[in-house]
Amino acid sequence: MKDLKSRITVFPVKSGSVFSSAFDASLLPPTGSFTVFPGFCDVHVHLREPGFSYKETIRSGTLAAARGGYTAVCAMPNLSPVPDSPAHLEEELRLIRRDAVVRVFPYGAITAGEKGEALSDMAALAPLVAAFSDDGKGVQSESRMRQAMLEAKRLGKLIAAHCEDESLLRGGYIHDGAYARAHGHRGICSESEWGPIQRDLRLVKEVGCAYHVCHVSTKESVALLRQAKREGLDVSCETAPHYLLLDERSLREEGRFKMNPPLRSPEDREALLEGVLDGTIDMIATDHAPHSAEEKARGLKDSPFGIVGLETAFPLLYTHLVRPGILSMDKLIELLALRPRERFGIPLGEEYTAWELDRPFTVDPGDFLSQGRATPFEGETLFGVCRLTALEGRIVYKNDT
Ligand SMILES: [Zn+2]
């Protein structure tokens, strides 16, 4: 083991020394050269339990997270039951305590049952949840959202909004652009996303609560958030790897290209990348949204929205943005590991992940630890293989080959 040091690069973390002091090189596989990063943190995953174990379980979802380098994830509340009260949330927490291999921070719902009507029991949920969200649905009523923001502010919690105006959807399921027109599909217009963002930013200005926008996908959304930050509002946002690396020109007639929001135009993709580079976009989340193989086999029109992302996010971003010099590794780690923790108040403990960066592999959904298999990146060759993820001295993922 005399050459162990020469085989390891520990990525420096500027904020605090917790990570570097906790790194235990003896856990690493005996062969290979590794770059060690602080454990990634994904603020937007769907673990599907309780309620939808046929799509994913807390166990399979967190194993997939560990393989992707994540040691902390925030779980969205579109579950059954919806975590809108401490009793309902306890059903989720019980499964997390029993089955999770990485740290899971549940979201509490903004409204009871995510129905957009009465508020959830936000005060009782606040100490137990990462933030509040009705993800999967937008809060349609402006007065309800104002009420939720006032309560979130009083409780010192973040509102994480899925922004979608249902009155503008008109049965759409992919971006309302060139591909939809050429292939006779119903489109989802960009305004269905940026309209609610614009509304909410007005409310944030009035109320003064901390506000985060989920999965930003349009150029107008980026411009609105850039302006809001200039005005000093307490806002943040995320986008996902597929919105940065794909656009409607990549679409095929398969369910694995369908997610909400949809893949937008090349101009939208460019604007998102600019937003990442200038700091308008704070973090990259996966919106890991697994479904069964049967559900996703129904094609672009009829399959449910959602693709998996935990096991491919880092290799995709590293291969397509860092290796060509578009994004620095510092910036990528800020987007994947540091900024999400800072914004959502998730401390970085003794948690890290070790990667072989120069090693290529081909994305093979058959080999995912997630139960979900739908990814538009199937068959792509990428760089970066995770060899170890560890949390508080425990190995949560290891690849010895
Ligand atoms: Zn969403």
Image (cartoon, rainbow, N blue to C red):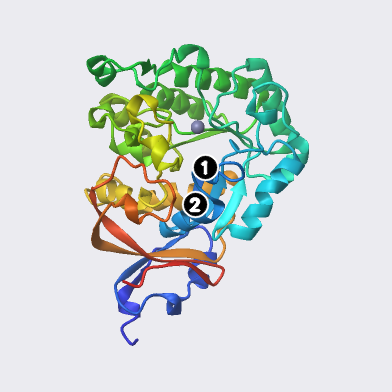
Q: Which amino acid, by three-letter code, is at mark 2?
A: Gly
Choose the circle earlier in sequence order: 1 or 2.
Answer: 1
Q: Is residue 154 visible?
A: yes
Q: Are marks 1 and 2 in contact (CB under 8 Å)?
A: yes
The spot of residue 109 in percent (x, y) is: 65, 34
Crowd rating for badge 1 (residues with CA inside 10 Å; few <14, some 14–19, many 20+)? many
Pick the residue in front: 354 or 85: 85
- Relative placement, left or right, of 104 versus 35 is right
Q: Quadrant of the N terminus?
A: bottom left
Q: Examine the rendered structure and indicate whether residue 361 appears above or below residue 374.
A: below
Element at label 2: helix
> What residue is rendered at 53% in x and 50% in y?
57
In three-dimensional space, the C-alpha distance between marks 1 and 2, rounded to whole angstroms, equals 8 Å
Q: Which amino acid, by three-letter code, is at mark 1?
A: His
Indicate the quadrant where residue 18 lies: bottom right
Q: Quadrant of the C terminus?
A: bottom left
The spot of residue 304 in percent (x, y) is: 43, 31
> What residue is rendered at 28% in x and 35% in y?
246
> Disc 2, ligand 1: is the CB inside 8 Å?
no
Which residue has dot 2 on it? 61
Pick the residue in front: 122 or 238: 122
Q: Examine the rendered structure and indicate whether residue 336 appears above or below residue 253.
A: below
Which residue has dot 1 on it? 46
Pick the residue in front: 308 or 236: 308
> What residue is rendered at 70% in x and 44% in y?
89
**Most extreme residue toward the front, as rendered?**
294
The spot of residue 9 in percent (x, y) is: 35, 69
